[in-house]
Image (cartoon, grey):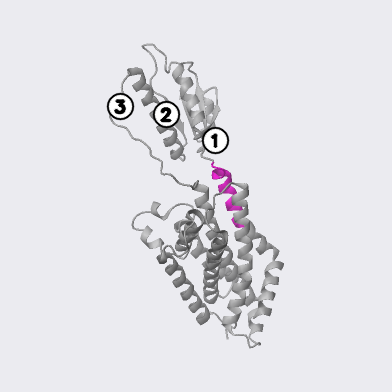
Amino acid sequence: MFKLFKTDLKMIVRNKQALAWALLFPLLFTSIFGLFFGRDNTSLGTINVINESSSELAKNLTKSLEESNLFKIEYLQSVDEAKEEIADGKMQAALYLPGKFGIKAPDAITKLTVFYDPGSTQMASALTNFVDKYLTGASFAIQEAKPIFSVQQEQVSSSKELNYFDFVLAGVLGLALMNGSVIGVAVAMGKYREDQILKRITTTPLPVWKFIMAEVLSRLVLNVFQITIILLVGIYAFGAHISGNYFVLLAVALLGGILFQLIGFVIASLTKTVDAAQGMTQAIILPMMFLAGVFFPIDALPRWLSPIVQYLPLAPLLRILREVALENLSPFHNLTNVGIVTAWIVVALAVAIWKFRLSEE
């Protein structure tokens, strides 16, 4: 089995295209989210501001927009130019302050206009809410009145400084393990079968379970490189915050690697060609990519759906990864998650040993 392990490892390294994809795919996701949300970047994006007013209220409003760090501001000279940029997809929203806004005159304008792309309602809502809140405060100040109801904030002391990128980074770890392991194993076994490599192994006394173990162990080495690259780029390039122990995090991630490699063997036992393996893997990993909590919490899903997706293989693994990485908790903090992952491993291993055959004869 050890000789087969070394052979599998050499084959993985020699397959430059598959190796590059396995390492670059998670790195691409990490870099994209890091550019948007890393280094404590809280900006929602860039907006246009057309300020034709010289009033003090207009100056203070634009100054508040700049200091909020919620938006990056670009100033334009005309509304038509702003509308053209929105229509061309160059900008998501724009705020127009007409010349008579904020002046002390009977014909003063008291309403501002937010122009936006219908596909950017989130940006429009954020900008509108910010401006509305500011103008409400200004109205009370001018009228020398105080609001009856209000809301206050109370910060709970914590040593953790976490952001959305930290949440996503743990998700990308799980996504990389799932994609690299499921696709890598299922497609590789399909290729071995088409090239008659599996059939040749039947001439040896090697049991199926030893073949599976050798494949899993060799691909765990690749998983170690995947995890290391993601963490190094996330932490040192984009300022991710990892509170937990790195070795514990690595151990949990490798457990996920074992789980998804076994799922890859289950797929390989049900498919006979590379094309069939690719189709089945995509049908399995794509729903999990969007439903298991890689990019957003499962709680954000509809109520009828969230209890179901919690039992997908990726979902409990991500919960354990985030508890270890972000909250510095033990992997056994929530035994339900551990139980679900363990159950999937046991079931996948049993099915793989039962169904996977080196020869179709």
Q: Main secondary structure of the magenta part?
A: helix
Instruction: Specify the amino acid type for callout 2.
Output: Val
Quadrant hosting residue 9: bottom right
The amino acid type, in three-letter code, at marker 1 is Asp
In what element is the residue under mark 1?
A: loop
Disc number for residue 88? 1
Residue 196 appears in the picture as rendered: no
Instruction: Answer above or below: position of 19 versus 93.
Output: below
- Callout 1 environment at 10 Å: few (<14), some (14 to 19), or many (20+)? few
- Residue 131's label in the rendered image is 2
Judge from the rendering whether residue 298 lies leftward or rightward of residue 212; answer left or right.
Answer: left
- Which residues, given as a range, are shown in magenta? 25-40
Q: CA distance from mark 2 to mark 3?
A: 17 Å
Labels 2, 3: front one: 3
**Earlier residue among tags 1 and 2:** 1
Q: Earlier in the sequence, mark 3 or mark 1?
A: 1
Q: Disc 3 vs disc 1: which is toward the camera?
A: 3
Q: How many marks?
A: 3
Please state if 204 lies on the left or on the right of 106 as rendered: right
Residues tagged 2 and 3 counted as in contact (Cβ below 8 A): no
Q: Is 31 within the magenta?
A: yes
Looking at the picture, does residue 336 appear above or below residue 64? below
Contact (Cβ within 8 Å) of mark 1 with mark 2: no
Which numbered disc covers residue 147? 3
Disc 3: CA contacts within 10 A as few (<14), some (14-19) or many (>=20): few
Q: Quadrant of the C terminus?
A: bottom right
Q: CA distance from mark 1 to mark 2?
A: 25 Å
Element marked by disc 2: helix
Whether 129 is among the magenta residues is no
- Depth check, front residue: 336 or 122: 336
The quarter of the picture where the N terminus appears is: bottom right
Q: Amino acid at mark 3?
A: Pro
